[in-house]
Image: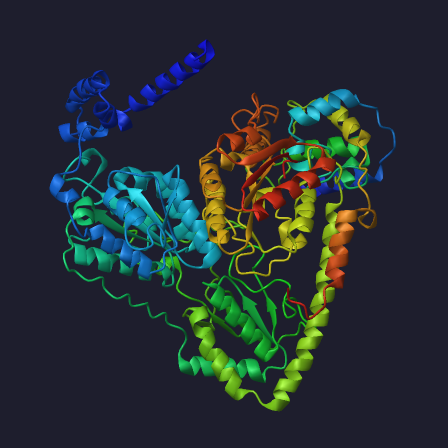
Amino acid sequence: MTESEKKSDKSAEISRRAFLGTSAGAAAASLLGNNKSANAQTAKSADRTDLPGQSAEAAERDVGGAQPPADIRAAQRPGSDLMVQVLRDLEIEYIAANPAASFEGLQESIINYGDTPNEMPEFISALHEESSVDMAHGYAKSEGRPMAVLLHGTLGLMHSAMAIYQAYQYQSPILLIAGRDDTNFLRSQSADDIAGIVRSFTKWDAHPKNLADALAAIQEAYRQAITPPCGPALVVLDTELQKEEAGDMLVPTYVPPKITGISNRDAKAVAKALVDAKNPRIAVGKLRTPRGVDDAVELAVLVGASTSTRAVIVPMSFPQRHPLCGPGSDTDYDYTLGLETAGVEAAIIGPHRRSIEGRDETGIGYGFIREPPTPVWGPYKPPKPGKNDMHADAEASLPAIIAEAKTLLSPAQENTIAARSKNHAVANHAAAVEALEKALEARRRGWNDSPISLARLYAELWILIKDEDWCLASPTQFSSGHNRVLWDHNKPYSHLGMHGAGGIGYCIGASTGAALAAKHRDRIVINIQCDGDLNMVPGALWTAAHYRLPMLVVMHNNRAWHQEYMYAQYMAGVRGRGGDRAHIGTTLRDPYINYAKMGEAYGVESEGPISDPSKLMAALKRGVDAVKDGRPYLIDVLTQPR
Amino acid sequence: MKILRILLVIVLLQNVHAQDLGGDVEKGEQLYYNFACYSCHGYNATMRVPLVGNASGIMSSEQVFLTYLRLRADQNPTNPKNAMPNYAASTLSDEQALDIYAYIKSVKDESPEVEDNPVMQEMLDAAKARSPGDAR
């Protein structure tokens, strides 16, 4: 061995020892005969017994010197296996988590139970609980159904609180499971009612006291999450339930919820009005699932109605470039039906989160007990009640309306509808071309500027993805939302909309969740990533790299929390003190952050910063090629502020 | 008071003369950055609320530019009327403002027309070529 090799070997040994000397490896170090290290840890743990709120057992466990009781380890059919079977029956595709000591039983079952371990659900390693929930939020928006998240007691719930809050505001279904352990080791990380931390902004929660109730509670949480108003629902599972012997207990059969649509009488009336109308129109808001979108299209085609859509700002709306989508050939509509949005003659609008009673008894407003100050670019803005509203879920109402319309249509009406639809298609096509011409003229200015124009970024990216199956997962209001007029949003998941409550840090996690959904569906995910947002929880990049997720991260790097920069600038002006110091506390200068290096640090192929617009297209193409190949890719682009 | 202000603007606009005093472009570029004009107008005065070329009437003359800044500054500070920040003379002198004006005037927008922009033209061609019955 050469000196160099000896030195290298020694470094490796030191590194290994250093690793084993950490708390997580103390037990292993003891087994390897590293008694000095183990003793040192013991002494340290002895000192910590005096800490308030932490038992000697907890301290011992924190340093790795304690193991679960032998009888727990000896369970032949642990309760957590049955919990996983419940999740499998619900076809939960993923469950995201930071590993934690309050759900080790459940985690072990996820990765080892059954003939297809770690499938349905697959355990997804996240680096922060906020990211875990954001992933589930992005997945839910993309697929219209929940994935699950595992959270660790009080601490994990608090880490995840903002993300849960945003999912609640957006009415996104998520199955939350929180581990709880206050009987053995982790009293300082527990509480009697840990669900209370997030009760004001979850739809439902339960803390079952036996295994049978726990299995039923998981199923009920799923039902609650997907029943409108959708939202995150939480089950607290004690560690003892996860580890107890299930014996011959059976997994209960899942009974899906009955989601109520409008009455048959109302369905007949709506169908008749649509069929009899000479120029019907259907306004489509945000439906719940892709099935609802399909049904909305079927109804519009069936009755030859021109439609409006919110697909450019929310998921699960009418395809933007469908021939019937647009003003139509005649804007003098004689019957307008709203689906989860306002309609003139009729609107079918499902229950909103504010209808969830008893969850916000303090009245602090999480549940919008008070009238919400919904921002103009806000998440899901429920329409104001109209006199012709029918309060039922629109998606659940569509099959009955379609069935009634089919029975009502005469051959003569079908011919009329065919002709009308053709006229609508021609008019809508012309309107779309005209709108694009105007949009391009408005956006050509500054095309060759450096830093790079965001309009150019969106335009060049569109050229590369327009023939792919894509999902724009990031909110776009901070990057001026050029996709709304330059791109075609034709899929239920084309654009996943806003944060939920404007909470920064959402974007990278939600995009990662959308990429989890996309991974097995031959889809790519686009994330126009704000720099301030990425700095909140950059660890999601590692998750994307680890699971080879098809996510293209294009940095909207304006080196600032730009909204706040403008606020500070404005406030200085109002007070007559000038705007030349508004950058203090609002910009990311000195030093500039290198996002390509950040991406590389987490294992994501990265390049940039790119400030020369002539080099942008080639970089974007490298990125799109990478994600089509199943590899996440990050491009740091120095952009104009907005 | 509001009517008086509007009349003042009208009078000023009617008396526009190409008698720009000629601020310092180099200083103006730095001031444009320091006072964060770029935050709304872009680094090259081409974005969002563009000022370059003939994009904005505010840039029709130095006097109009100055008047607009000062009118903004004189507005009720507790009830701002639009997103343009206030710039009183006490925080941005006339000389500095005219330097900024000179810088903005010096910027040339060399953006290609839509028909000369291959990316935009491809987008437009694709939209036109889409069959009215194609719901791709």
Residue at 41 percent of width and 70 percent of height? A391
**Quarter occupied by the C terminus of chain A:** top right
Q: Would you identify the image quadrant in which residue A574 lies?
A: top right
Image check: A281 left or right of A81?
Answer: right
**Picture coordinates of residue A623 (x, y %)?**
61, 42
Using the image, determine if residue A126 lies above or below residue A148: above
Residue at 58 percent of width and 63 percent of height? A309
**Quarter occupied by the N terminus of chain A:** top left
Q: Would residue A599 be seen by someone viewing this image from the given angle?
A: yes
Image check: B97 left or right of A502?
Answer: right
**Picture coordinates of residue A423 (x, y %)?**
71, 75
Q: Nearer the viewer, residue A345 or B128?
A: B128
Image check: B56 left or right of A267?
Answer: right
Tell me how many marks there are.
Answer: 0
**Picture coordinates of residue B126 (x, y %)?**
74, 58
Q: How is the image coloured?
A: rainbow
In the image, farthest residue toward the front: A1
